[in-house]
Image: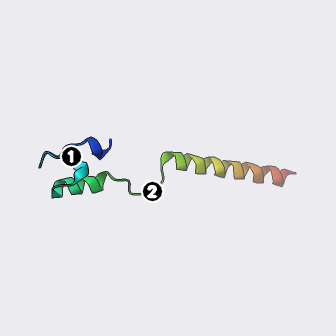
Amino acid sequence: MTYDRLVCANCAAPVAEGRCPVCRANRERLTPQGGLSPAMVLTLVIALLATLALLATVRTV
């Protein structure tokens, strides 16, 4: 869920506007903090498995 559709219970304004301290705190909490997305983790795992498979074939030849 994104904060652009949420309404603050404290000031009854959209959270995205950040009118009160509660809105600003929730807006900070809901914004992406970086980190790895599940798609990025899956891509890294596939790349690791492909590298290991390539190394295994090179060693057996």
In the rendered image, which residue does mark 2 sit on? 35
Which residue occupies 26% across, 50% down? Answer: 16
- At label 2, the amino acid type is Gly
Q: CA distance from mark 2 to mark 1?
A: 27 Å
- At label 1, the amino acid type is Pro
In the rendered image, which residue does mark 1 sit on? 14
How is the model colour-coded? rainbow
Q: Secondary structure at mark 1?
A: loop
Q: Residues within 10 Å of mark 1 (few under 14, many from 20)?
A: some
Which residue occupies 15% across, 56% down? Answer: 20
Q: Where is residue 15? Give x, y as percent.
A: 22, 49
* Residue, far right: 61
9 on left or right of 32: left
Which residue occupies 54% across, 49% down? Answer: 40
Between residue 42 and residue 15, name the one nearer to us: 15
Q: Where is residue 18? Give x, y as percent.
A: 21, 54
